[in-house]
Image (cartoon, rainbow, N blue to C red):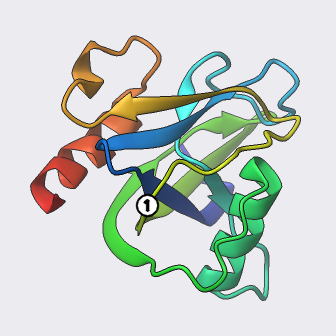
């Protein structure tokens, strides 16, 4: 199958002191929704001309209302998936950045999401709302912390 749309995505893995990770549930109102009702790490595709860091800041602010400017961020994992979005085959390369927070920040979700959940790093496998893509990130995170 031909890949019509290659893209780079950036994701912010907010790790709280209790070793939980901020996740957002994809809403039915998400126009690009490919896994409605499942949990995702905040972030999205960078726009043409943006740096990786600019895209990460913009996506996190859009999806969570959290301004990460000035917070230490650390690239710790990458992944790839090939969804069909609006009838087009995409190849998405995702970069995952660890952001350790001293307390769980207040979150304001966008129209793309309808719920917030903090998922335990130790117990993520038992969580029915995660996709295999998120499993790989949690596995990398377990090795990191």
Q: Quadrant of the C terminus?
A: bottom left
Residue located at (27% from left, 42% from top) = 138
Toward the viewer: 89 or 17? 17
Number of disc labels: 1
- Tell me: 114 left or right of 14: right
Residue at the farthest front position: 103
Quarter of image, res 128? top left
Residue where numbered disc 1 is placed: 102
Residue located at (78% from left, 33% from top) = 87
Toward the viewer: 118 or 13? 118
- Tell me: 62 left or right of 102: right
Quarter of image, res 97? bottom left
Instruction: Tell me: residue 37, above or below residue 136.
Output: above
Q: Position of residue 137 (x, y in %)?
A: 31, 47
| Mark 1, secondary structure of its residue | loop
Quarter of image, res 88? top right
Q: Residues within 10 Å of mark 1 (few under 14, many from 20)?
A: few
Q: Position of residue 96 (x, y in %)?
A: 42, 63
- Tell me: 140 left or right of 8: left
- Tell me: 106 left or right of 140: right
Q: Position of residue 61 (x, y in %)?
A: 77, 62
Instruction: Tell me: residue 70, above or below residue 8.
Output: below
Instruction: Tell me: residue 14, above or below residue 58.
Output: above
Instruction: Tell me: residue 100, above or below residue 103.
Output: below
Residue located at (35% from left, 16% from top) = 127
Residue at the farthest left position: 143
Residue located at (42% from left, 42% from top) = 21
């Amino acid at each position: 199958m031909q890949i019509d749309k290659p893209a780079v995505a950036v994701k912010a893995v907010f790790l709280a002191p209790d070793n939980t990770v901020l996740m957002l549930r994809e809403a039915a109102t998400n126009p690009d929704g490919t896994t409605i009702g499942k949990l995702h790490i905040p972030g999205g595709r960078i726009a043409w001309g943006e740096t990786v860091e600019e895209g990460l800041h913009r996506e996190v602010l859009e999806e969570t209302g959290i301004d990460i400017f000035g917070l230490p961020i650390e690239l710790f994992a990458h992944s790839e998936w090939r969804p069909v979005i609006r009838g087009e085959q995409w190849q998405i390369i995702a970069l995952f950045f660890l952001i350790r927070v001293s307390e769980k920040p207040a979150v304001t979700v966008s129209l793309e999401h309808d719920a917030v959940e903090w998922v335990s790093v130790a117990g993520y496998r038992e969580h029915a709302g995660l996709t295999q893509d998120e499993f790989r990130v949690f596995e990398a995170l377990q090795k990191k912390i």
